[in-house]
């Protein structure tokens, strides 16, 4: 009995010493996320930013930003998870599109505010899209408004979006 226990312990210790290359580990499938900020009546930044779970980010400015052209940056796993989780509650079913705007799932709306589009894509699946008009002030979308406002901070791109700074 003692020999069997000792042999089992030795096997466990040896198994813990075994090495494995990173190529052996399966990579979890995750979505590429594209966040686009539309125009407003004023000088808000108009841009799109795309991040993938492998750590790549690209900002494509259109108007009122501090960077003149496409800018690449690194996305940490924590940043990716925070971005993914910020919109998880409002993400439509895979392959579907959801719109939140005046007259469409929104009762209290102001004019001249930017619209935002979040698109999730994954190889072999249809894209999933959420369109949100930020002038929608229904209380049920307070967390979504906060998520939209947090994107620049989550991805650490605030300085890229502040024109003239």
Image: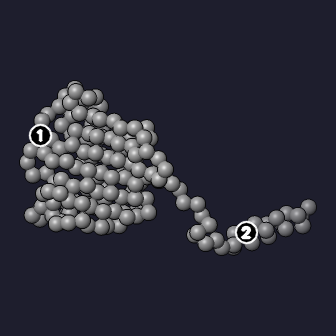
- Crowd class of label 1 (few under 14; some 14 to 19; many from 20; radius 10 Å): few
Q: Earlier in the sequence, mark 2 or mark 1?
A: 2
Can residue 55 be seen at all in this image of the molecule?
yes
Residue under the point 40% across and 64% down:
55
Residue under the point 29% across and 35% down:
99
Quick check: 64 left or right of 27?
Answer: left
Residue 61: give x, y in percent of width and height.
20, 59
Residue 161 image-quadrant placement: bottom left
Residue 133: give x, y in percent of width and height.
22, 38
Quick check: 18 left or right of 92?
Answer: right
Quick check: 44 left or right of 51?
Answer: left
Of badges 2 and 1, nearer the viewer stands: 1
Using the image, tell me which numbered label, if any, was put on residue 112. 1
- Element type where label 1 sits in the image: loop
Q: Which residue is label 2 attached to?
A: 15
Q: CA distance from mark 2 to mark 1?
A: 63 Å
Residue 135: give x, y in percent of width and height.
18, 37
Is 84 above or below relative to 137? Answer: below
């Amino acid at each position: 009995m003692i020999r069997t226990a000792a042999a089992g312990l030795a096997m466990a210790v040896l198994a813990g010493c075994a090495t494995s290359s990173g190529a052996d580990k399966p990579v979890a499938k995750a979505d590429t996320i594209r966040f686009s900020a539309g125009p407003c009546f004023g000088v808000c930044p108009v841009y799109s930013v795309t991040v993938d779970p492998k750590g790549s980010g690209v900002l494509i400015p259109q108007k009122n930003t501090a960077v003149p052209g496409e800018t690449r940056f690194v996305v940490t796993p924590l940043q990716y998870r925070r971005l993914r989780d910020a919109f998880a509650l409002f993400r439509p079913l895979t392959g579907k599109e959801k719109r939140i705007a005046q007259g469409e799932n929104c009762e209290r709306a102001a004019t001249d505010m930017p619209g935002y589009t979040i698109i999730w894509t994954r190889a072999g699946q249809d894209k999933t899209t959420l369109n949100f008009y930020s002038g929608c002030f229904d209380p049920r979308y307070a967390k979504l408004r906060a998520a939209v406002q947090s994107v620049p901070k989550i991805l650490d791109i605030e300085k890229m979006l502040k024109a003239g700074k």
